[in-house]
């Protein structure tokens, strides 16, 4: 059923009135309503916040030193104990076994290297021994004794000298002493003779000439090897023997002792 013309006009007026009521707020606020929360749309009346930035330190080294001084360092024993606990008590079994194996391997390797190094030095060093001891010249007072040494090693012997020598009527008697200030070097296979004068009594000299007495000579040869180590060579010999010779013979308790 179609509406009449007056009814249609009435409906049209109502619609226009409704549209005018919707547009009324826009007419009172010409700028419109800005969406809230949109970025960059701040209200002019809203107060601005000022960010406060702390100033940078002027002396960074002193600041680090002060911080380091405030933290006391642990004692060495404490740090070692913490290290041991961290390795042996806070690791699983495989890690512990691996660490122990590594330590044992390092120790064995070091011992093997040390043993090889020592064997090398023993094989290559100088060895000075006593070749013979004789009476130089006639049996008289003082008695001149010649100590003949030889280097049987592979390298030179340095600062070879007769450190001490003494004589007496027994192996333990050292009433007479002598000195030899000669010092030199000995290449491998060479000899060096040290001459020492021993002041004996007339009775001792007569007994040596008649072969009714004996004189015992003890002493030490000292030298350095090329590795910087000092070595002594001790000797003990007596004169005369039953054979009419000028040579000394090894003492019953032992003769030359190379070290």
Image (cartoon, helix red, strand yellow):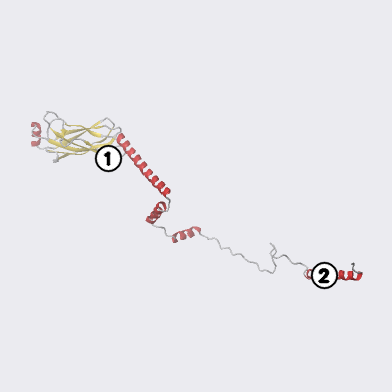
Could you give the CA–CA distance between mark 2 and mark 1, rounded to whole angstroms? 124 Å
Q: Nearer the viewer, residue 114 or 124?
A: 114
- The picture quadrant where one finds residue 222 is top left
Vertical order, 59 against 199 (above or below): below
Q: Nearer the viewer, residue 104 or 197?
A: 104
Crowd rating for badge 2 (residues with CA inside 10 Å; few <14, some 14–19, many 20+): few
Question: Which percent across, then down, holds residue 247?
Answer: 16, 30
Residue at coordinates 16% horizontally, 32% vertically from top-left? 249
Along the horizontal axis of the image, is 108 left or right of 189?
Answer: right
Residue occupying the far front of the picture? 1
- The picture quadrant where one finds residue 132 is top left
Q: Which residue is mark 1?
A: 230
- In what element is the residue under mark 1? strand
Residue at coordinates 84% horizontally, 69% vertically from top-left? 15
For the N terminus, give its image quadrant.
Answer: bottom right
Crowd rating for badge 1 (residues with CA inside 10 Å; few <14, some 14–19, many 20+): some
Residue at coordinates 14% horizontally, 36% vertically from top-left? 216
Along the horizontal axis of the image, is 172 left or right of 77?
Answer: left
Question: Which percent across, then down, holds residue 62?
Answer: 48, 59
Q: Nearer the viewer, residue 84 or 91?
A: 91
Along the horizontal axis of the image, is 256 left or right of 102?
Answer: left
Q: Which residue is mark 2?
A: 18
Residues at discs 2 and 1 in contact (Cβ within 8 Å): no
The mark nearer the N terminus, 2 or 1, is 2
Along the horizontal axis of the image, is 190 left or right of 245?
Answer: right
Residue occupying the far right of the picture? 5
Q: Nearer the viewer, residue 229 or 194?
A: 229
């Amino acid at each position: 059923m179609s509406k009449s013309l007056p009814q249609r006009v009435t409906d049209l007026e109502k619609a226009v009135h409704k549209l005018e009521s919707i547009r009324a707020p826009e007419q009172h606020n010409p700028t419109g309503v800005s969406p809230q929360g949109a970025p960059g749309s701040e209200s002019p009346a809203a107060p601005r916040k000022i960010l406060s930035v702390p100033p940078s330190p002027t002396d960074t080294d002193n600041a680090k030193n002060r911080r380091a001084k405030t933290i006391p360092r642990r004692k060495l024993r404490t740090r070692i104990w913490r290290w041991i606990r961290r390795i042996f008590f806070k690791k699983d079994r495989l890690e512990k076994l691996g660490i122990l194996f590594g330590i044992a391997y390092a120790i064995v390797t070091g011992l093997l290297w040390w043993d090889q190094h020592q064997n090398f030095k023993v094989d290559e060093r100088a060895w000075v021994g006593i070749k013979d001891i004789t009476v130089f010249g006639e049996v008289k007072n003082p008695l001149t004794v010649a100590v003949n040494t030889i280097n049987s090693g592979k390298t030179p012997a340095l600062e070879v000298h007769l450190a001490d020598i003494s004589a007496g009527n027994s192996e333990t008697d050292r009433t007479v002493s002598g000195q030899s200030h000669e010092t030199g070097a000995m290449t491998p296979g060479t000899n060096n003779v040290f001459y020492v004068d021993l002041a004996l009594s007339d009775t001792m000299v007569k007994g040596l000439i008649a072969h009714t007495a004996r004189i015992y000579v003890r002493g030490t040869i000292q030298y350095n090897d090329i590795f910087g180590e000092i070595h002594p060579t001790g000797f003990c010999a007596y004169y005369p023997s039953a054979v009419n010779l000028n040579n000394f013979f090894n003492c019953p308790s032992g003769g030359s002792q190379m070290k």
